[in-house]
Image (tube, helix red, strand yellow):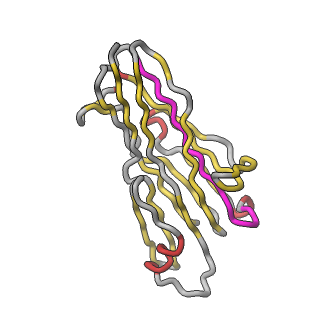
Amino acid sequence: MSRLRFAVAILGALLASICLGQKNRVFGFNSLQRLTGNQAASKLKKPMSTGYMVSVIGNFGGTFTVHGMGSSNSGRQDEFINIVTNEPLIFQAANFTTLMAGGSPASSAGSITYEMQLYDGSSSSVGAAITAPVSGTDAGFNGAQAVLSTASVPGNGLVVLRLSRTLTLSQLAEGATTYTASGTIVLTIN
């Protein structure tokens, strides 16, 4: 039996674009770092009268380990990211790639289908769906948007972003190989 190890990392997982009047501020962090609302606010030196609040806490990274051979697909793997906001938001997928092996494209080995959706609540208590799911496979996910409108912001400000992945492998996937894929979720505060 061959053993195939597959790793997925959303590199540069989140870019938050925060608009203050005429100034745009961008914050980026990868799947190992966290930027909370208090840290973001202290870096912005925003006036107290602005009254907006956005906090994003979670991890977009994921890993699949595959044992055996043949073509198949994994079950859906979900990541839940906690958001606290009193502002409308747009989450947009950008720069998602095909499977890579050692820095070279390996799309013949398989693909990843991504899906994102916004819910009311928190990662420990996911509530009703706020948006419809948006999905795509590999680079076909680029441009997909989950939009939290002003009217949809919950009264308590608690929102959950669900990012899901399903790995599909072909018989051309090699054992004892680490495949990677990357992408960015861009957060814009309207």
The image quarter containing residue 3 is top left
Q: Residue furthest front?
A: 1
x, y percent for residue 66: 41, 25
Please provide percent x and percent y for residue 2: 33, 16
Residue depicted at 47% across the width and 35% down the height: 140
Vertical order, 121 against 166 (above or below): below
Quarter holding the N terminus? Answer: top left
- Taking the magenta stretch, the answer to whether it contains residue 162 is yes
31 relative position to 165: left or right: left
Q: Which image quadrant is residue 149 in?
A: bottom right
x and y percentages locating residue 14 in the rendered image:
45, 56
Main secondary-structure element of the magenta-colored stretch: strand
**Vertical placement of residue 27 versus 124, above or below:** below
Residue at 29%, 27% (x, y): give it.
177
Say left or right for 100 vs 189.
left
Give the residue displayed 51% in from the left and 36% down from the top: 165
Between 183 and 73, the one nearer to me in the picture: 73
- All told, the count of numbered labels is 0
Q: In the image, is 7 to the left or to the right of 46?
A: left
Quadrant housing the C terminus: bottom right
Determine whether 117 is above or below 67 in the image. below
Residue nearer the viewer, 145 or 5: 5
Looking at the picture, tell me which residue is in the foreground, 65 or 13: 65
In magenta, the rendered stretch is: 154-170
The x, y position of residue 23, in whole percent, is 45, 77
The reply to whether the magenta stretch includes residue 172 is: no
